[in-house]
Image: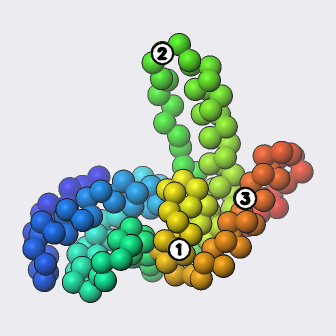
Amino acid sequence: MRTNEGLISSVPGKLPKLDFETAVRPELSVLYRVALRLTRNGADSEDLVQQTLIKAFRNFGKFDGVHLRSWLIRILRNEFASSVDRSAKMRAVELNDDAPDGTVIWNELVWRDQAHRILQEIDQLPRDHAVAVHLCDVEELSYEEAASALGVPVGTLKSRLSRARSMIVARLRNPALHQGDIR
């Protein structure tokens, strides 16, 4: 990912550079993972995070100080929505295939297979359902934080999560019965 040092220092803002960087730096990995879930492409994810950081920096003085992660994810989601090409073919997220060190390789392989299958099923969900699952179940945001990030009421988020989780479980139990039923 490109560094944001030159970017941050070249954009004028009301707050000192260090305040923005200190606040946002711990959220970069989360922003990248959410961007990757949205774009399903590493390079596009990096670009989306960079655009998000530019917009966040320009508006940092307007931030109310509550739920920084949700605020950043909302900016990221809005940036994605404004730039997405609806006809682009979506690509699946690839898992890292590095083998772990140690004697518990079989447990690790089983876990990776299960995680890979679950991530594949999340990718098959409608985008709003997939992002809801990612925010709550992968990034472990609270319902309130995720709902704020998505700009929806908590009840809508819970409904999306319930439906998405049910679809994932049904597909994992019997994938042959659910070919092409989502989207």
Residue type at numbered disc 1: Glu
Which residue bears the numbered disc 3?
165
Residue type at numbered disc 2: Gly
Q: Are marks 2 and 1 in contact (CB under 8 Å)?
A: no
Among numbered discs 2 and 1, the one appearing first in the sequence:
2
Residue 167 image offset from top left, x and y in percent: 78, 59
Residue 3 image offset from top left, x and y in percent: 20, 56
Q: Quarter-wise, where is residue 124 in the image?
A: bottom right
Q: Nearer the viewer, mark 3 or mark 1?
A: 1
Q: Tell me how far mark 3 sits from mark 2, CA to CA.
A: 33 Å
Residue type at numbered disc 3: Arg
Residue 54 image offset from top left, x and y in percent: 25, 73
Q: Nearer the viewer, mark 2 or mark 1?
A: 1
Residue sitting at x 21%, y 83% = 61
**As rendered, which of 120 and 141 lies closer to the eye?**
141
Q: Tell me how far mark 3 sits from mark 1, CA to CA.
A: 18 Å
Circle 2 SS class: loop
Which mark, by number, is residue 102?
2
Among numbered discs 3 and 2, the one appearing first in the sequence:
2
Which residue bears the numbered disc 1?
144
Q: Please indicate whether residue 29 sits to the left or right of residue 143 in the image.
A: left
